[in-house]
């Protein structure tokens, strides 16, 4: 892959130089006679060299594994009734083929020795010595299929190199020969860039659609096995892979909203006030020190915040608040996770709000001062309303981050699913249970595993609703102040 990319980039660079030189030569060295700037001619040749080759390369990388797996699966003696066994066998084949390639790369044995491996040998032990783990012993059928898959993949890579290289050279040749001084190179380059931008946007949209459709599919399978009324309105969460599960959403949703609410109560006032101070009151010297120190909080891993909640914040809240007030005796609680999560969210609110406040036009402030308003009145009545759309976006980002947090909740709030108003009781969230239901040996034909997709879809709908509300607020105030 690195060689292929290097060849494509090298040919694209060569095409840029040759295309630019040919355009200048066709104008007799007088760039004023060119339709476009010389750079556009070079870019046109480079794009025609690189883009088609890269597109074919991406398609090849996606299609080749599917074609190879289909050829290997078709050669196996399995009927449609044995589809599950065939899928498991193909998993072993892929794992063994990848393991042999990895062992060759690590020098455990040569490519020639890999070709003559026999199932009678302890292949599993040989690969384990090279740092490659297999789940079971290797049978003759799996070894033959894996060797054939390796051969097909190797042949596919060779053909991929040939096809992509020939296509890049053909594109370079065609673009170079069609370059002349009257060519509308700028128009062609701008159309190509527009096409690339549209492609990138389409990929982003299709990725979102694919994620939603995959969740919808598995959620539909879940509701075929478990009543939707019991899921959306159930008050108990007691999954059991032995049957008789209670998979009520409300305790998890309550824990998610409760912890997120406390986190926002901590993060939004502190972050917003810090942003107002740094944007409106702090000197440049103070701002240059304070803002980076606040933004350091965003770079701390969430596992560190979780340990901070488990070791420091939780015991402190238990000893100084929960036990004296008779509200509980556990260090894992909603308040613990909410406070620590709020600390984590402060830089999200602070940095974004600071940037938005600084982007408010200075003439709005000057007009307010000219009318006799004080600085605090100007901030309250002019700056903050004008910056409100951006501040709402910052709060929304913090809320989405809080709803999707997992590690702090696991270590700080526990794993108990309950409906309780006591903030010093242990609770859990939707994300924690998604991880729990998909951890370990999972049977995706059971509602206890498929419920994770229903929970994920619920979170998606929840964050989508937050986005809609935020857009309505942003639109209202943007129309008022633009």
Image: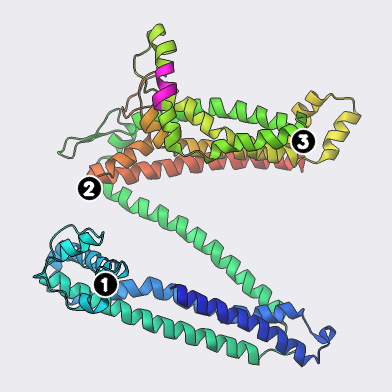
Q: Depth-wise, is mark 2 or mark 3 nearer the camera? A: 3
- Give the CA distance from mark 1 to mark 2: 24 Å
Q: Position of residue 357 (x, y in %)?
A: 72, 37
> Circle 2 is placed at which residue position?
442
Say what secondary structure mark 3 lies in.
helix
Mark 2 or 3, nearer chain start: 3
- Where residue 154 appears, as percent x and y from the top left, is 32, 79
Q: Are marks 1 and 2 in contact (CB under 8 Å)?
A: no
Question: Distance of mark 2 from mark 3, alpha carbons?
Answer: 56 Å
Q: Secondary structure at mark 1?
A: helix
Residue marked by disc 1: 69
The answer to whether residue 182 shows anywhere in this view is: no
**Which of the two residues, 25 or 74, is positioned nearer the viewer here?**
25
Give the mark nearest the N terminus, 1 or 2.
Answer: 1
User: What is the count of numbered marks?
Assistant: 3
Q: Is residue 351 left or right of residue 445?
A: right
Magenta span: predominant SS is helix
| Quadrant of the image occupied by residue 390 | top right
**Marking on residue 184:** none
* 166, above or below 482, in the image: below
What is the magenta range?
310-316
């Amino acid at each position: 892959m690195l060689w292929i990319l290097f060849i494509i980039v090298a040919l694209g660079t060569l095409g840029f130089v040759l295309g630019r030189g040919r355009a200048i030569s066709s104008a007799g060295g007088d760039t004023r006679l060119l339709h476009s700037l010389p750079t556009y001619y070079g870019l046109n040749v480079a794009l025609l060299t690189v883009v088609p080759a890269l597109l074919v390369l991406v398609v090849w990388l996606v299609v080749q594994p599917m074609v190879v797996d289909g050829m290997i699966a078709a050669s196996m003696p399995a009927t449609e009734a044995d589809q599950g066994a065939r899928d498991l066998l193909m998993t072993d084949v892929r794992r063994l083929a990848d393991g042999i390639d990895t062992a060759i790369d690590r020098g455990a044995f040569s490519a020639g020795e890999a070709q003559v491996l026999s199932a009678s040998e302890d292949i599993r032990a040989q690969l384990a010595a090279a740092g490659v783990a297999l789940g079971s012993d290797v049978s003759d059928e799996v070894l033959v299929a894996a060797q054939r898959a390796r051969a097909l993949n190797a042949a596919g890579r060779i053909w991929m190199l040939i096809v992509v290289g020939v296509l890049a050279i053909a594109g370079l040749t065609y673009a170079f020969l069609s370059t002349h001084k009257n060519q509308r190179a700028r128009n062609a380059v701008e159309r190509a860039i527009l096409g690339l931008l549209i492609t990138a946007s389409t990929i982003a949209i299709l990725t979102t659609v694919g994620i939603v459709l995959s969740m919808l599919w598995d959620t539909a399978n879940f509701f075929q096995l478990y009543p939707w009324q019991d899921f959306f309105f159930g008050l108990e969460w007691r999954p059991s892979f032995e049957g008789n599960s209670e998979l009520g959403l409300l305790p998890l949703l309550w824990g998610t909203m409760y912890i997120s609410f406390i986190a926002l109560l901590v993060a939004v006032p502190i972050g917003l006030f810090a942003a107002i101070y740094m944007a409106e009151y702090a000197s440049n010297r103070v701002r240059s020190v304070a803002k980076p120190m606040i933004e350091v909080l965003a770079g701390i891993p969430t596992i560190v915040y979780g340990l901070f909640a488990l070791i420091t914040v939780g015991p402190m809240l238990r000893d100084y608040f929960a036990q004296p007030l008779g509200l509980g005796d556990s260090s894992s609680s909603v308040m613990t996770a909410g406070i620590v999560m709020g600390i984590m969210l402060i830089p999200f609110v602070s940095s974004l709000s600071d940037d938005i406040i600084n982007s408010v036009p200075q003439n709005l402030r000057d007009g307010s001062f000219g009318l006799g308003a004080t600085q605090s009145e100007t901030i309250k009545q002019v700056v903050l309303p004008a910056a409100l759309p951006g501040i709402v976006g910052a709060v929304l980002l913090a809320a989405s981050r809080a709803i999707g947090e997992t590690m702090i909740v696991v270590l700080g709030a526990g794993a108990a699913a309950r409906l309780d108003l006591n903030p010093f009781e242990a609770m859990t969230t939707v994300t924690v249970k998604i991880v729990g239901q998909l951890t370990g040996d999972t049977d995706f034909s059971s509602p206890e595993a498929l419920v994770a997709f229903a929970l994920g879809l619920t979170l998606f709908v929840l964050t989508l609703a937050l986005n809609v509300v935020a857009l309505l607020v942003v639109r209202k105030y943007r129309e008022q102040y633009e």
